Image: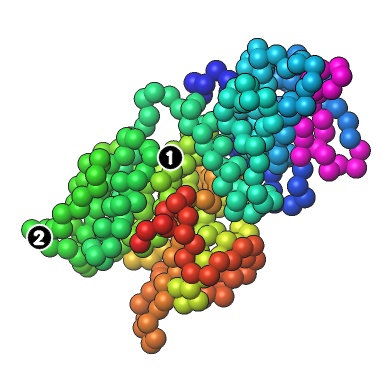
Amino acid sequence: MSDPVLEPGDTPVGRVPGAGVERRARLGLSREGWVLRRPLRRPRRGRWADGLAALASRVGDLDDVHHLEVRACDDPGGRVAAADVETVVAPFARRAVARGTLVLADLPDALGGAVPVALRGVAGAPGDLAHDLASVGQRRGVLAAALPADLPTVTAVVATRRPQLLGRVAAMLAAQTYGPLDVVVVVHGGDPDALPLVDVPGRQVRVVAAPAEASLGRALQVGCDAAEGELVTKLDDDDHYGPDHVLDLVLAHRVSGATLVGKSTTIVHLEDLDVTVRRVFGTPESYVHRVAGGTILLSRADLAEVGGWSDVPRAVDSALIRSVRSAGGRVYRPHDLGYVYVRHRRPEGSAEGHTWAADAGHFLVSAREQWLGLLRRPELGTTAT
């Protein structure tokens, strides 16, 4: 990583605390100076480090800590040195954030800007949406600042039999914060001589056709063959993507070293019940066996090396993941935010529907949070439909 504040091991891989018992630590002033204390909810308190000199070597002690509180406002003696905050405390806080700990700061106004990633407070416990949005937002900001200047180019591939949905997809792609992104739209069953015009402001778009009789896997391969990006990511035409979705995948690909990365179907809108649920689903920032097909990202070179998309009509995502794993590649899941999987209402008596056979009840199992209707949040890409 290029950010001098971060070290090579400062990543969230395998370190983001789970949603069990909440653990906190505090970095603050004592009579002897700055002290890093053990998690506040452990039966016995103790010190990890005394003084700023010992601080940098102890960042790994925070790997199972949800919150780090940086407190120095109650400093009547004026002992908070700006140089210490800027050169030691702030870098320590940024490293903690990069590794998965949420930082809450309470510093004098004159020094508050020295820890730019910190918040003064956040609602919710670990695992709640409000908490996780804050934590992921901090982490994303720190890791993105460490990206190299020559960012990898990404092509988003969208295969669709429903061109009427492309306007919504185009709006979500136009809102992506990741810079070097272009788009390939595959009209599955479209007339090559009468393809729709798809406008994604600020992005180059290529529209290609795949024969109606071609399998979904073949249609996706047509799209990836037309891609020019170093990395390719698959988007589904009916799901929701937040503005940082592509950035999240690029960061995950970089920090994990995995061949293929993707998010999970944790946040789901169930049309039959008109509710949005967020499920307990594995451990974020970890190597996994599968990810959501509508979020897959890998390099074009790796895709070619495993033989591309399988020429199958269903379970194309599972087939690709199997190919990657069979070739010795790893699959990685960062967090679940910025992606909403839509489970559509299937017309009565219809055999048509999702290639993933599961009823609505499947998605209610282990739901940790639930909202009526489609949850409207800009971070999820659901503020407009």
Position of 95 with respect to 232 (left or right) is right
Question: Looking at the image, can residue 133 be seen?
Answer: yes
> Could you give the CA–CA distance between mark 1 and mark 2, rounded to whole angstroms?
33 Å
Position of 182 with respect to 60 (left or right) is left
Residue at the spot 62% in from the left edge and 36% down from the top edge: 119
Report the quarter where the C terminus lies: bottom left
**Residue 103 drawn at (x, y percent):** 66, 35
Say if mark 1 contacts mark 2, CB within 8 Å: no
Amino acid identity at mark 1? Leu
Residue at the spot 50% in from the left edge and 39% down from the top edge: 252
Q: Is residue 25 magenta?
A: yes
Question: SS of the residue at dot 2?
Answer: loop
Residue at the spot 49% in from the left edge and 21% down from the top edge: 2
Magenta residues span 24-44
Position of 175 with respect to 47 (left or right) is left
Residue hosting label 1: 247
**Residue 188 drawn at (x, y percent):** 23, 62
Position of 377 with respect to 97 (left or right) is left
Residue 100 against residue 127 in the figure, above or below: above
Amino acid identity at mark 2? Ala
State the mark number for residue 161: none
Residue hosting label 2: 194
* Of 326 and 88, the residue lying toward us: 88
Residue at the spot 77% in from the left edge and 35% down from the top edge: 25
Question: Looking at the image, can residue 61 be seen?
Answer: no
The quarter of the picture where residue 101 lies is: top right
**Residue 280 drawn at (x, y percent):** 63, 59
Q: Quick one: label 1 or label 2, which is nearer the N terminus? A: 2
